[in-house]
């Protein structure tokens, strides 16, 4: 489900810190942090550890050994607040790395964009569930935590086929009415984004 | 060619410094000129005795102005003839052909802060930037590295409240480029225009400080680009062989032979003149082709690039 013929489908890679950057901020969605992932971060970020801050959002209480300085945040809203409060502190030479589910990645990326981060300063790494945020092309509502290929729109109740077309601005996939041609004929839902 | 030709008349010419001449150019027919945006240039066809020089100059007139184009031209010691012609021969009342203005160096208007670094006459594109930022209220800073006696020369073009610092080669007055670039907030765009060595130094310092390439912009100028050893070039489609002299560019030799080659900036920046190279070893001097394209040896930009040795065969 991470590979698609649709060009707008984002491609995520392993995080690769850029050694010339002045500051490094790693924002991690706690529920997706596994021991293996933490070990991968420790290895990748080791060389820049003195200039690394990690914001851990929710998740495990006992993290164990980690590179850099660790800060705990309660929720995504805290990340958004902290980014906007700290905007004077971010330089053009800094880099932001985000790891987590797609809805998490793109909400952090959007908040970072608001404080001046360029896309070239941000790296996104997918971890955890494939659940999607879906944007209804009919009523423009957002439906969160979608794990099936057909979902009910939280706004208008239409049965939406979840497509791979992705909007970076909305951080959401396109949902179009699945039974527009033949009302009531809705295929069986499959759990494909678990 | 992109755009039509304009016929301009020299309305005023002023020596604003020993080596700087300011020209005010109006439409020869008395009409309005096409508007140009901040960072734009105009390419003049200067008909000197030996040959026609086509040189691009940044417009220092207010962006959008339609009554006149203003340029400031430095008399270059090793001039190939363009700047010497403007300084010594062009007189008020003369007409000059020009291409429509183009812009290869526009400011990024979504920037949170505009940081400009100029070397000498490289200040000219930033004079139009300042006029725009004065109106838009964009956060900005211009650092000019120049001779101390030229600090006052550009004062008439600096809007009130413009944030400009001058630097020159003396203790306490030099620009500390790494320190300047290390202290910039996220969302800043950097623009540099000056001699090649200074451009290269600023771009390298930005890389070292972790700037993303998307936020670093450069306009090259200079005269050391086009001369070199004489060589020959064969234009395969036209069936013409041209000899390229030491003090002219391949593009100029092609034009002299009467072959219309596409071109715009004539400084190796815009890519319009990129021409398929069928045979020969090119010495690439442009800022446009990627390292991969250079290595492939299949493209050349005749406005600045030459033959490393022997003869070139172009698909032209």
Image (spheres, rainbow, N blue to C red):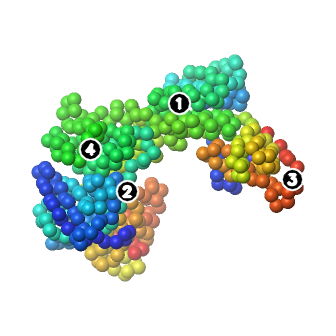
Dot 4 and dot 1 residues touching (CB under 8 Å): no
Instruction: Tell me if residue B261 comes above or below residue A182 in the rendering.
Output: below
Q: For residue A128, which quarter of the picture?
A: top right
Q: Mark 4 points at which residue?
A: B159
Dot 3 and dot 4 residues touching (CB under 8 Å): no
**Chain letter belonging to callout 3:** A
Q: In 3D space, how far apart are the residues under numbered discs 2 and 4 (Cα atoms)? A: 23 Å
| Disc nearer the start of the sequence (3/1) | 1
How many other residues sit within 10 Å of disc 2, few (<14), some (14-19) or many (≥20)? Answer: some
Q: In 3D space, how far apart are the residues under numbered discs 2 and 1 (Cα atoms)? A: 34 Å
Please say whether residue A177 is visible from this viewpoint: yes
Rendered location of residue A179, percent (x, y): 83, 56
Instruction: Tell me if residue A38 comes above or below residue B265 in the rendering.
Output: above
Q: In 3D space, how far apart are the residues under numbered discs 4 and 1 (Cα atoms)? A: 32 Å
Please say whether residue B56 is visible from this viewpoint: no
Rendered location of residue A21, percent (x, y): 47, 34
Do the residues indicated by labels 3 and 1 lie within the same chain of the protein? yes
How many other residues sit within 10 Å of disc 4, few (<14), some (14-19) or many (≥20)? Answer: some
Q: Name the residue under label 1.
A: A84
**Chain letter belonging to callout 1:** A
Report helix, strand or loop for mark 1.
helix
| Disc nearer the start of the sequence (2/4) | 2
């Amino acid at each position: 489900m991470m590979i698609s013929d649709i060009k707008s489908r984002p491609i995520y890679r392993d995080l690769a810190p850029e050694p010339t950057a002045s500051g490094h901020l790693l924002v991690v969605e706690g529920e997706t942090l596994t021991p293996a992932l933490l070990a991968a971060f420790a290895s990748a970020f080791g060389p820049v550890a003195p200039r690394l801050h990690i914001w851990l959002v929710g998740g495990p209480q006992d993290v164990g050994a980690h590179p850099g300085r660790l800060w705990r945040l309660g929720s995504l809203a805290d990340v958004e607040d902290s980014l906007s409060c700290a905007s004077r502190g971010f330089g053009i030479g800094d880099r932001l790395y985000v790891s987590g589910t797609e809805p998490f990645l793109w909400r952090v990326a959007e908040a970072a964009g608001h404080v001046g981060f360029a896309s070239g300063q941000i790296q996104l790494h997918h971890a955890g569930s494939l659940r999607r945020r879906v944007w209804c092309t009919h009523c423009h509502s957002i439906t969160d935590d979608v794990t099936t290929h057909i979902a009910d729109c939280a706004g208008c109740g239409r049965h939406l086929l979840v497509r791979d077309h992705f909007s970076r601005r909305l951080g959401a996939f396109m949902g179009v009415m699945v039974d527009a041609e033949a009302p009531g004929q809705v295929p069986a839902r499959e759990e494909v984004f678990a | 060619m992109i755009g039509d030709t304009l016929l301009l008349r020299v309305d005023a010419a002023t020596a604003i410094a020993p080596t700087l001449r300011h020209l005010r150019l109006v439409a020869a027919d008395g009409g309005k000129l096409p508007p140009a945006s901040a960072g734009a240039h105009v390419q003049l066809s200067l008909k000197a005795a030996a040959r026609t020089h086509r040189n691009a100059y940044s417009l220092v007139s207010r962006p959008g102005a339609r009554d006149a184009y203003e340029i400031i031209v430095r008399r270059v010691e090793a001039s190939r003839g363009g700047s010497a012609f403007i300084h010594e021969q062009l007189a008020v009342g003369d007409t000059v052909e020009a291409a429509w203005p183009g812009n290869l160096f526009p400011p990024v208007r979504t920037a949170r802060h505009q940081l400009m670094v100029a070397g000498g006459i490289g200040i000219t594109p930033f004079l139009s930037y300042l006029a725009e930022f004065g109106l838009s209220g964009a956060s900005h800073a211009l650092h000019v590295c120049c001779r101390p006696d030229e600090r006052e020369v550009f004062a008439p073009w600096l809007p009130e409240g413009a944030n400009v610092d001058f630097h020159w080669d003396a203790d306490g007055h030099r620009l500390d480029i790494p320190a300047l670039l290390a202290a910039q907030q996220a969302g800043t765009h950097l623009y540099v225009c000056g001699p090649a060595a200074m451009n290269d130094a600023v771009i390298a310092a930005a890389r070292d400080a972790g700037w993303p390439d998307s936020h670093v912009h450069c306009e090259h100028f200079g005269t050391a680009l086009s001369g070199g050893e004489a060589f020959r070039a064969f234009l395969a489609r036209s069936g013409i062989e041209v000899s390229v002299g030491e003090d002219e560019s391949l593009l100029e030799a092609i034009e002299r032979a009467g072959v219309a080659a596409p071109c715009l900036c004539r400084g190796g920046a815009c890519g319009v003149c990129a021409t398929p190279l069928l045979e020969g070893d090119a010495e690439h001097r442009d800022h446009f082709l990627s390292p991969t394209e250079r290595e492939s040896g299949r493209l050349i930009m005749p406005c600045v690039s030459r033959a490393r040795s022997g003869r070139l065969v172009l698909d032209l």
